[in-house]
Amino acid sequence: MTGGRVDWLPEGKRAALCFSIDDVHPGMGNQEHNAVGELNQGCLGHLRWLLDRHPHLRATLFTTADWREISPVPTKRLLARIPYLRERLYLTPILPIGTMRLSNHPEFVQFLKQLPRVEIGLHGLHHVQRGPRIPIEFQKLSAAECTRTLQEMIAIFAETGLEYSPLLNPPGWEITESLTNAMIETGIKSVASARDLRTPISSAAIANMSGLKGVSLIYPELICGGQLLHLTSNFQATSPVDRAVAIIKNGGLLAIKAHAMKTVSGHTALDGLDELYRNYLDLVFTRLEDMYGDSIWWTSMGEITSRCMNGSNQMVLKAGTRS
């Protein structure tokens, strides 16, 4: 599945930084419905604070079209112990179809549209599947099923008029050949599957943690015969500042990851964007600004995709169109 390195840095830039947030949907905050004022106080409020503090910072919000997940871990624990049967059933309650459909929440969509220096990435249709690995939406789907799912996801974005970058972060990081084939068919240009927070930084380091294995840890890389660009997430709240500095020193892409929700149904995301993580990122950004100034390309996953795959500065596709 892997391919090769690609010329991706603009002239005069030694390295790059991008920031992305997963699990963006209208019900963020452990509630079925969030008022816009509440969004300003939660994850997206922390994001806005960072954007105000760091004028070069940009962000990619990986957004789910019709979020149905209530718990990321099984709550039907007895059923989860029964082989075969557990793979065929939902092991936690899920929201009815349409509850969190983006087109049913115009105020939330409008809130996303007015955020400065923010792009939207694709993060699945429902963010659930049957079986114990609840968020891994595409794991068991055939290529045809993946294509239908992606098409329905894109159709929901079209309903809202919400622009998006042609990039996918598959829920749970998992990527399959069926999914890559479907992405190519539906016009998606890049994927952020691998996440590795442990492998030491070097120019030859490869990802070996979550999602896709064997791709570059710090450089954008062409996969699937050059038809998709892969970007690895390599830094989060638990990572030391020295890891960020090492990526920049090696001329890499410092791809910082956060999740929109800190605690859900008793499960705590170590990279949930709360005030503590926000303040830590402020420290990291300030240190890099002081050390490297304008030599860092503060960019987004969508802009990197456009530079590498389209050869233009057109960052986003209008929902419902194909490249």
Image (cartoon, helix red, strand yellow):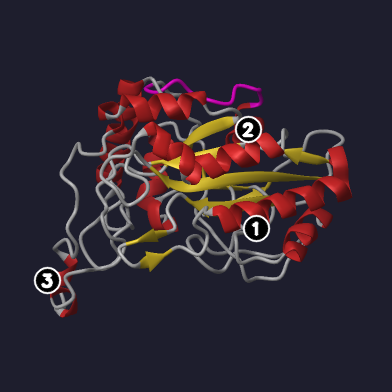
Identity, as a three-letter code, of the amino acid under mark 3? Leu
User: Residues under labels 1 and 2: Cα distance?
Assistant: 19 Å
Return the residue at label 3: 85
Which residue sits at x=35%, y=26%?
107
Along the viewing direction, whichever of 135 and 3 lies nearer the viewer: 135
Which one is closest to the eye, mark 1 or mark 3? 3
Q: Quadrant of residue 289?
A: top right
Residue 146: x percent and y percent? Answer: 30, 44
Judge whether 145 appears above or below 208 on screen. Answer: above
Asked if disc 1 and disc 3 are in contact, CB closer than 8 Å, the reply is: no
Magenta stretch, main secondary structure, is loop
Return the residue at label 2: 303
Q: Quadrant of residue 145?
A: top left
Magenta residues (range): 311-320
Judge whether 31 appears above or below 317 on screen. Answer: below
Q: Is residue 311 left or right of residue 90?
A: right
Which one is closest to the eye, mark 1 or mark 2? 2
Q: Is residue 224 visible?
A: no
Return the residue at label 1: 216
SS class, disc 3: helix
Residue 267: x percent and y percent? Answer: 37, 66
Disc on the earlier residue, 2 or 3: 3
Which residue sits at x=52%, y=59%?
271
